Image (tube, grey):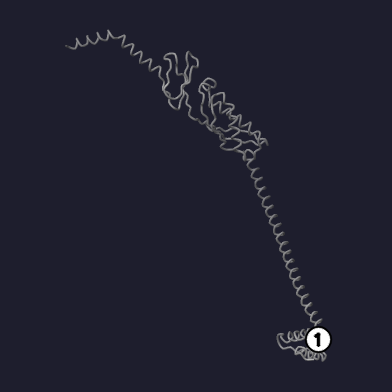
Amino acid sequence: MNDFQAEDIFLTLLADNILYLLGALLLVIVVLKGIRIVPQSQKFVIERFGRLHAVLGPGINFIVPFLDVVRHKVSILERQLPNATQDAITKDNVLVEIDTSVFYRILEPEKTVYRIRDVDGAISTTVAGIVRAEIGKMDLDEVQSNRAQLIAEIKRSVESAVDDWGIEVTRAEILDVNLDQATRDAMLQQLNAERARRAEVTKAEGQKRAVELAADAELYAAEQTAKARRIQAEAEAYATGVVAKAIADNGIEAAQYQVALKQVEALNALGNGDGKQTIVLPAAALEAFGDAFKLLKGGK
């Protein structure tokens, strides 16, 4: 069999089975058209005769070939809007610049593609309006100190505004709050004045505490002095009581003995002085000392 005969046989077979081949090809095309594999990070919006028909989720999906058309392939990954800066005026009439950042993701693509054209632009405009409205309700100090509360309020308001678009706002952040130079200078002066006031208050409190401690020390010293005097008075009273009892028990001789003892102690103190001393005593004093020595010796 030569080449011409083989070619004739192939053409004959092809002519006899052309319909089968066309049918098989059509079947393959139909199968391919009817199967849609959707990636995990996307959803497909299906239209039939120009109208929304279905939304295909991740995995293998079947559609009607030639009738159902994949019109939109929408990513469901979280997205970040470009950082935006907008001016706002606080409740106490201070102009501030707010840097914001918003993260969102599409939950219902059928709402997003048919209700809004520019998603990022719409969300940015909504966020700017909400930020200005919320800043206008707060004083500058509240904006600085209650940033977490402000972010939560902005996120809640944005979520409510974009709910009809099938979008979920996952995060809203205030990156920075900028002030003009005049306001910064005024705040710096206020801060310095507040620091000076606190320093004066601290100094005054220290002085007050020092006065209180000094008064406590004086009171303690007075209490100790009074206690010492009381103890001394009690000792003297006790000694007087002992002398009085001795006098009551032994008569005048006990009193003379005490007087003589005091005289001898006085003479001893004079003799113990520094240097050489000459003491001139009257005769009566000498007689008194003599009597004292006799009493101390037990003489009559």
Q: Position of residue 54 (x, y in %)?
A: 48, 18
- Would you identify the image quadrant in which residue 4 lies? top left
Q: Answer left or right for 101 relative to 93.
A: left
Callout 1 secondary element: helix
Amino acid marked by disc 1:
Glu
- Which quadrant of the figure contains the N terminus? top left
Q: Note whether residue 180 is visible.
A: no
Above or below, 268 relative to 28: below
Q: Note whether residue 3 is visible.
A: yes
Q: Residues within 10 Å of mark 1 (few under 14, many from 20)?
A: few
Which residue is tagged 1? 253
- Which quadrant of the figure contains the C terminus? bottom right
Instruction: State the residue at coordinates (40%, 17%).
Output: 34
* Depth order, front residue of 115/234: 234
Q: Position of residue 266 (x, y in %)?
A: 76, 84
- Would you identify the image quadrant in which residue 292 lies? bottom right
Q: Answer left or right for 68 relative to 8.
A: right
Instruction: State the residue at coordinates (70%, 60%).
Output: 213
Q: Position of residue 30 (x, y in %)?
A: 38, 15
Above or below, 104 relative to 296: above
Instruction: State the residue at coordinates (27%, 10%).
Output: 14
